[in-house]
Amino acid sequence: MIIVVLTPNDDGKSQINLDPLKSDSVDFTIVGMPLGVSDAEDTLNRAGGLFVTGDGGNAGSASPNWLPKDLEVVRKALKLDMPVLATGYGMFLLNQAFGGKPPVPLTDHGSDNRGNGEKSASHSIYLSPGSKSAATLGLGGFFKVNSRHTEGLFDLQRAPRLLASAYSVEDGVVEGLESPEHSWVIGFQANLERQAESPRAFNSVFLAFFERAEDFSKSRSVARV
């Protein structure tokens, strides 16, 4: 099974952690960085899922600019109803793919600027128990997650077609998005791929993503027969 990983092409300023994707049953192709491939269209036609991610390493750094071609990759995956998981800066791109507005500057997120990329600020979020994201975790409620962003989305920037599944407790910043129009399209502002900084329950998000991607790959194989 192939997972496409879409990251910002910003000269290495953004970092990615692919540890949750490392499995004997998963091959991943990175799009958007020099070590990846440029033909994302062809790759998506062979893939089971799309993972959109990227963080600044430095917990106080500003988010990168996604390119138009990155937006087209997400829209292609959505058109295919492919499973999509977006984390960190990837949630901003997911929001834009549905017609949402760019993020706005924040003052109290990612403020623990230690400069080495290994430490992060954290804050509490509330995950709606009735959301698809909560169903994936098996529970909703309050969680403490990492905070590696100095920009974010409020409801004013959120695409109306997307549901907000989680909010920051302190200021109401949108911390989770999901699509009611697709089988499995979920985004989190937290960089869940940094599993040491995330509640253990959120490991279920990657497990569910893999299961959905595997099912999608199988359905494609059957359709080709």
Image (cartoon, helix red, strand yellow):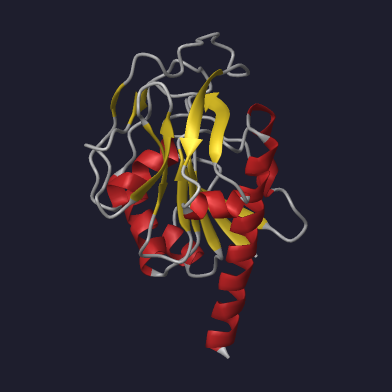
Q: Please determine whether, in this image, residue 125 is positioned above or below residue 121.
A: below
**Whether residue 6 can be seen here:** no
In this view of the protein, which residue sits in the foreground, 146 or 124?
124
Label total for image: 0
**x and y percent of residue 12 in the render?**
49, 29
Question: What residue is rendered at 61% in x and 38% in y?
Answer: 193
Q: Please determine whether, in this image, residue 138 is positioned above or below residue 33.
A: below
Question: What residue is rendered at 40% in x and 65% in y?
Answer: 182
Q: Please determine whether, in this image, residue 80 is positioned above or below residue 108.
A: below
In this view of the protein, which residue sits in the foreground, 154 or 142?
142
Question: What residue is rendered at 37% in x and 61% in y?
Answer: 180
**x and y percent of residue 168 in the render?**
42, 28
Question: What residue is rendered at 74% in x and 61% in y?
Answer: 25
Viewport quadrant of the C terminus: bottom right
In this picture, residue 11 sits left or right of residue 208: left
In this view of the protein, which residue sits in the foreground, 188 or 72?
188
**x and y percent of residue 55 in the render?**
49, 30
**x and y percent of residue 4 in the render?**
53, 55
**Whether residue 36 can be seen here:** yes
Q: Please determine whether, in this image, residue 59 is positioned above or below residue 158.
A: above
In this picture, residue 70 sits left or right of residue 60: left
Q: Residue furthest top?
A: 114
In this view of the protein, which residue sits in the foreground, 97 or 8?
97
Viewport quadrant of the N terminus: bottom right
